[in-house]
Image: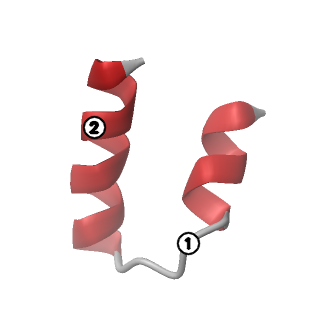
Amino acid sequence: SAKVDIVFDPPWDKDMMSEEAKYELGML
């Protein structure tokens, strides 16, 4: 749920989303 929220919150592109998602997951 949290992951989806973080990914759906910001208007990022598929590339940026993937990069950011990876970073967020790594940091978490």
Horizontal placement of 1 versus 21: left or right?
A: right
Where is residue 20? Give x, y as percent. 30, 52
Where is residue 26? Give x, y as percent. 27, 21
The image's colouring method is: secondary structure
Q: Residue at x 71, y 34 (%)?
A: 2
Quadrant of residue 18 in the image? bottom left
Nearest-to-viewer mark from 1 and 2: 1
- State the mark number for residue 10: 1
Horizontal placement of 12 versus 18: left or right?
A: right
- State the mark number for residue 22: 2
Does the residue at mark 1 contact the one at mark 2 (Cβ under 8 Å)? Answer: no
The quadrant of the rendering that contains the C terminus is top left
The quadrant of the rendering that contains the N terminus is top right
Q: Residue at x 37, y 35 (%)?
A: 24
- State the mark number for residue 28: none
Q: Amino acid at mark 1?
A: Pro
Q: At numbered mark 1, what does the secondary structure look like: helix, strand or loop?
A: loop
Whether residue 19 is situated above or below residue 24 in the rendered picture? below
Mark 2 closeness class: few <14, some 14–19, many ≥20 residues within 10 Å: few
Quadrant of residue 9 in the image? bottom right
Quadrant of residue 21 in the image? top left
Q: Amino acid at mark 2?
A: Lys
Q: Residue at x 38, y 26 (%)?
A: 25
Mark 1 closeness class: few <14, some 14–19, many ≥20 residues within 10 Å: few
Camera-nearest residue between 14 and 26: 26
